[in-house]
Amino acid sequence: MMRSSARRIAVEAGSRLADLLTMGGEAFDRRDANGVDDAYRRAVEHVAGTDRELWLALAIDHVALLIELRQLPLAANRCAGYLDQAGSARPSLLVLRAEIRSAQGNQDGVREDAAELADRRDALTADERARMDRVTALAAAGNGDLDGARRGLDAAERAFRVIGDLAAVRRVRRDRILVGLHLGEQDAVDEVLTDPQLRTVADHLAYALALKDRMRYEQAIQVLLAVAGPGVEPERRAHVLHQLVVLYRITAQPEEADRCLTLLVDAVAVMADQRIGAALVADLSDERVAEPARFDQRIRRVRRLIVGSQLAEAEAELGSARRAVRGDREVGLWRLAAGELELTIGTESSLREAVEHLEIAAADTSPAEVRVDALRALGRACGRLGADAAAAHSWAEAHRLEEHIAGLQLTDRVRIRMLQSVPDEHDERIRAAFSMVDRRGIDGIAAVVVAMEAARGAAILGRILPGDTGSVRDLPRPSDHEGAWRWINQIGERLPRSRVIWIMHSTHDRVHHAILGRGLLQHVSVPCWRPALEAAIDELMSCWANKDTLEDSIESGQFEARLAAVADQAGIGAALAEIPAQVRRIAAVAGGALAEIPLAAVRLPGGQNRVCHRFALSDLPCLSALLPLQRRSRGLRGRYRLRISPPAEGLAPAPGLPARTRLAGTHVTPGAVRAELERHSYRQVRIDAHGRYDHGNTARSWLQFAPAGKAGRLEPRALQDMNLRGCATMILGACESGMAQRVGRDERVGFARAAIHAGAASVVAARWVAEDNVAGAVLDRFEGYARYLPRDVALQRAQRDILRGARGTPTELPHADHPARWACWTLFGDAGRESGAPMIVRLVRRGQQLWRNHVRRR
């Protein structure tokens, strides 16, 4: 940078000074900062007191070389020492000190040096004046004066061109790009992404900002992590850590964000410019330490004030910030904050103003992250004005953008967490309904339930009741609270007082529960961050990944501990507490990961008993499926049982109940089963077979029939195409046959879903690996109880027999009563009696049969 200054001074060849300068030059070429420092320190001391001009030239070279080697703390220390000795020869050293302070982010220090040099610019060379213009412009940029920074950089570039310093011209161009990045100028972003130069911390920051502008957040994090270590000077490191906190928050990684925030506080504590450091910390929190420097920081503070209901202060600051609006980015940010302020005020006129502001903020000219927030707020404003279609469109568009942004990240882990941590259009509808509960009471709760129902996938309904799906999904509009109550009441009236429906849904920040029964509607909402809940459920599900892990989780107590943790996070106990004492049967409607929770195994509040001790459980895909499945069940005319027992090595034969037809042995092929189901209509079909569940793609799961190998495999799609229209109960006695894959709008695909598609009214299947002896005992007892009890009660009785070690159950098995043994079995679909005919009809038919038998005997 300044190595030429000493060379303008004649140095005698072979002298002590020449040797020291040669040593320093060689050390510089090796990038040996200590060697440079030692050689030049001794050279400066050698000429001290003899040649003032040479001393100054050597001192300037010493500091300049250390700056070029990025040894800023050491350069600052040496420069301070030389300034104390320089007397009137300070201007050149002040320029160096300003450059050091600029590189360290000490903008106050730069302004201090600029003020001292204001009346002494004539003492500077043209090169020094240009360098001072550059660092002063960078100081203006650091304080948010981006227009002033541009003017200063333009002046510096012109001066460097005049003196022919093309390397300095290139540095100024890089500085201008950095300013452009803060302004969101796409030309600057394009230039950095096209030609990334990652030599300095500033280069890494510029590249990360460009990646951030293009929403490639995870890649930006990787770039910054390379320069976030403790070896980086505190001022630069603080800016790196600040951006890392922002990026970790955007990518839904709060633990990493908190860790970096702690490191940022530590870095700020040793910064030379405490004002800048305090502003960096305040920008990430609710603290009011310093005035924000940049426009985006000012808007973030306004939005925090709005969230904190400090509306008067927010309005004042928003009015002040309006004068700083320049390009499209600032317009979008300002309109977003203005729209959120009007939305919070909430009067009809302010809601209409909010719509005007937010429509501008949501335009294509705004950055994507601004558009997402604007679309969400726009949907809320439209919803409160009764414009339901516009609200739904805005929320859907916001989620589409979120999916696009998540798709730009590098890893599935980050993509999934980002989508889990933001609301989709269904979450927004639930949130909007929930916000009205206090004002609308029972009607508001009904609107929440209808919004939860809308989030449940409806694709299965067309296969439950073909041709009638329109009326099945004729849900009230979001703003029709009274209509929501009427719709809910119609369902509740069809339920006996001993039975309720428990619908639950996890939004990005809460879990909502509703208990619906005859004359009953209760709502419970608990705060819960969805990524954390789903991570806890994934940990629980890992307990039953295979037989070995299941046994280990039983022995270690992990199964119980993780189940309790999930139940606590999801607020299961709070919901159970709202169920009236007379209720004994529950139909659960759970979406997403909540559907994986084995509710029967959860302990009841305040005791050791489990849910299955008190309640008989069944599983419904959605509220709207209840009545169609009941009608299907009542309309079935199958009279006999079919037992399908293909060759299954190691699978103990289950006696069960006598079956009219039993397909067993090597002739039990998928084709033979299909043909048998076409020939006869069976009330109950039971399959005892081995199988395999494919966690990556449920469509590739299979039940093994004959012959062995691929030719004998029955996949869900093939089961779905079979004729089960006379089947009241399909029993799948295969491990993991009840597991399902979540796709789309909470739709769940798997064997249970396929059987219902094929016409079955209900399916009994296992969610995880079931011990053969326990499986046989549960299913045999279920068959027996189902002759005279509702299916959900029959399964409850069978599970409780295992739990209490009833006679004939496999009590010799270690931990035979553990819920991991029996809670895997789930009843999907209709929970009523297996026979489709009402009780009176069954009695008449039985009487008729007895009379015919009597006549024959005569």
Image: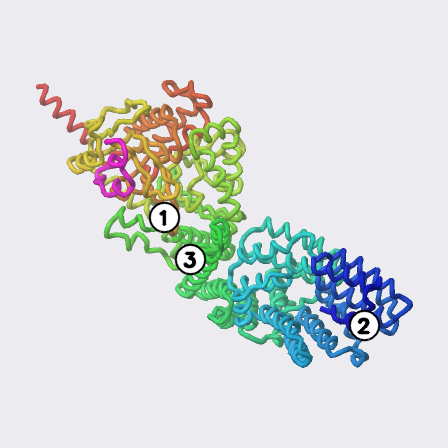
| Residue 387 part of the magenta segment | no
Q: Give the range drawn in magenta.
A: 707-728
Helix, strand or loop at label 3? It is helix
Disc 1 designates what residue?
747
How far across and down, in percent of the image, does residue 185 sit?
A: 55, 72
- Of badges 1 and 2, the one in the foreground is 2
* Pointer 2 with pointer 3, Cβ within 8 A: no
**What is the quadrant of residue 70 in the picture?**
bottom right
Disc 2 designates what residue?
9
Ranked by sequence position, the earlier of labels 1 and 2 is 2
How much space separates mark 1 and mark 2, taking CA atoms?
81 Å
| Amino acid type of the residue tagged 3 in the rendering | His
Helix, strand or loop at label 1? It is strand
Ranked by sequence position, the earlier of labels 1 and 3 is 3
Ranked by sequence position, the earlier of labels 2 and 3 is 2
Q: Where's the N terminus, which quadrant?
A: bottom right
Disc 3 designates what residue?
481
Q: Residues within 10 Å of mark 2 (few under 14, many from 20)?
A: few
How far across and down, in percent of the image, does residue 794 sit?
A: 34, 30
> As rendered, which of 418 and 485 lies closer to the eye?
418
Identify the residue shown where x is 44% and y is 64%: 394
Q: Would residue 30 be seen by someone viewing this image from the given angle?
A: yes
How far across and down, in percent of the image, does residue 791 sit?
A: 32, 33
Helix, strand or loop at label 2? It is loop
Along the horizontal axis of the image, is 324 left or right of 652?
Answer: right
